[in-house]
Image: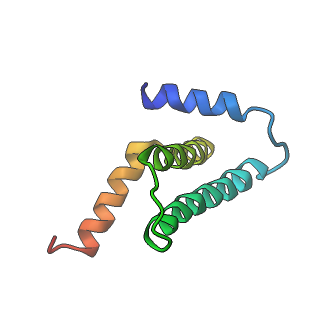
Amino acid sequence: MTELEYAKFVDLKWRNLLTGYGADKVAAALGLAGEAGEVVDLIKKQFIHGKLVPSECIVEELGDVEFYLAKLRSLYGIDRFEVLIANRLKLDKRYPER
């Protein structure tokens, strides 16, 4: 699946969920925060509570994170590779010795 195909899939699933100025952006940001929290909860269960967390569970939650990231990128007209490049440049500047 290409990045464009995935973005179209996200838009199709998202369609008509919310209306109103900025509602999509707020919903996507809140969804991202919630799903990131679910990833954190799985890691907590593993390292704090000593529970076995199958990688499939992590994959599932990271997939939900990707869904909301894709929607936010779409709403702001940002390409995923633009984000990756900007992040790399920021981290190279922050950690030039690595």
- Picture residue at 48% right of the left edge, 28% below the top: 4
Position of 80 with respect to 74 (left or right) is left
Q: Which corner quadrant of the image does residue 29 belong to?
A: bottom right
- Picture residue at 57% right of the left edge, 42% below the top: 67
Position of 68 with respect to 88 (left or right) is right
- Picture residue at 52% right of the left edge, 45% below the top: 66
Position of 41 with respect to 15 (left or right) is left
Vertically, is 40 above or below 12?
below
The spot of residue 85 in percent (x, y) is: 33, 52
Vertically, is 5 above or below 46?
above
Q: How is the image coloured?
A: rainbow
- Picture residue at 65% right of the left edge, 32% below the top: 11
Q: Which corner quadrant of the image does residue 17 belong to?
A: top right
The spot of residue 64 in percent (x, y) is: 57, 45
Query: Closest to the observer: 40 or 87?
Result: 40
Number of labels in the image equals 0
Query: Closest to the observer: 13 or 91?
Result: 13
Vertically, is 42 above or below 3?
below
Image quadrant in which the N terminus is located:
top left
The spot of residue 86 in percent (x, y) is: 36, 57
Residue lying furthest left: 97
The spot of residue 81 in percent (x, y) is: 38, 44
Position of 66 with respect to 15 (left or right) is left
Image quadrant in which the C terminus is located:
bottom left
